[in-house]
Amino acid sequence: MGRAKATAEWNPLRRVVVRRPGLEAFFGLLDPFSSLYERVFSLERAQREHDELVHTLRRGFGVTVQYLDELMLEAAGRHHDVLDEMVRMATESILFNGPGSQRARRELIGNLPQMDREVLLSIIMLAPSISFIKKRGARNIEPFTTLRVPLTNLFFMRDQQAVGDKGIIISRMAKPQRRRETQITSFAWRAIGEAPVMTVSRGTFEGGDFLPCGDFALIGTGDRTSPAAVQEILAQGISFPEVVVVHQPRHPLLGTNDPMVNMHLDTYLNFPGDGLAVGYPEMLTAARAEVYRRTSEGRYRRVRQTRLLRYLEEQRFRLIPITTLEQMCYATNFLTVRNRSIVVPEVGTNAEKVLANLHRAAEVNPAKYQRLFQRAVQDFNELRSTGTFFPNKKVARDFGIEATRVPLSNITGAFGGAHCLTSTLERA
């Protein structure tokens, strides 16, 4: 029986699962736009940043950090049924085309049980397709290998699932680039005995849109999470007394909508402690919120509509506000390790790269991005001159926030920070 459970973002963090960016991120960098990345970045430095995050969680806070690949490989080494399923997944993940494809497939099926588990895992991750062109002569065959949507975002371990008060909820990813990721993570959880409580089958849902808050939970809807998926989760996946469904707001400074700017709820709101929120006020004020209450029969009933900021105030949460630029620099994408103690990206270090990327966007499409860029420049000048990039704010210190900064200026180029990089399996 699995122990995966999280009822509040500020409860002590016990166990997380991560995946170090690897070869799949290399392919993502060849075209950052189609890979859902914000900008190009150094893969080598991103890997070092990821290592620093893991080191901080393990050595600084005693959190058990497990690697996704290692969990699957170890489980396959211990259990024949797990290895058999890995072989089956590898068989389904590779395609052959052209003369000799049937022979190649027969040989592959015969050879897979003898292959290293690491090779099986690479086949599953990369999903290669091999096309043969036969030329005259013995074994004069040219194999052309392509990859069918490599999982360039798999290291963002937050999104393939959410963990609530009943356990793991397997997502149904919104973008085709990411849809195979849940096949791998759901296999991993089952392999280590963490059976999910449900798998979303209608609409779409991603874990970055879920924030457990003790007596209530927030679920964001918008570009990545749909109302149909939320209703399925309400029916099967959680049992919080209240659930607030938050509708993704349009950024107030954009000429036309760009959902990537606030793709998930955790890109503009997070909780560093009990009764404390960090968020971007303009979005919190604009975000429409539907409140559902759990009945004595165990069903959720919609009771009212409000705005997200107003709801948080009603729940007596104090807001630590952030600026437009800080929101874009992943200030809310921190990981709370215990009440009022967070691991947060170096927001000030991220700022120059975010500004440069936004400047390019404003030059190409000024009607859409110019106002946003101008506000970001204004924020940058003020925050730099006063040295008040989050979390270095008086209000945060007054509330007793202890912040451990980690350098993530490269890995955030893929559109995510410390929160996105970690799948929380267990909070005390």
Image (cartoon, rainbow, N blue to C red):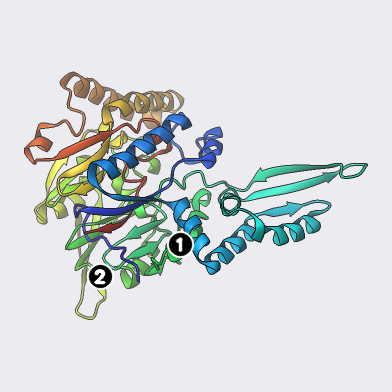
Residue located beneath label 2 in the image? 239
Q: Quadrant of residue 373?
A: top left
- Tell me which corner region of the image, top left, top right, bottom left or bottom right, holds residue 331: top left
Name the foreground residue: 333 vs 244: 333
Q: Mark 2 falls on what kind of element?
A: loop
Front label number (2 vs 1): 1
In the figure, residue 195 lies in which quadrant? bottom left
Q: Quadrant of the N terminus?
A: bottom left
Query: Closest to the observer: 68 or 115?
Result: 115
Looking at the picture, how far across and down is residue 154, in whole percent? Answer: 46, 48
Q: Position of residue 402 (x, y in %)?
A: 15, 39
Disc 2 marks a residue whose amino acid type is Ser
According to the picture, the residue beneath numbered tag 1 turns out to be: 186
Q: Residues within 10 Å of mark 2 (few under 14, many from 20)?
A: many
Of the pair 335 and 14, the residue shown nearer to us: 14
Asked if 368 appears above or below 245 in the picture, the reply is above
**Residue shown at the point (43%, 59%) measured from the top left:** 204
Q: Is residue 146 visible?
A: yes
| Image-based side of 361 in relation to 245, left or right | right
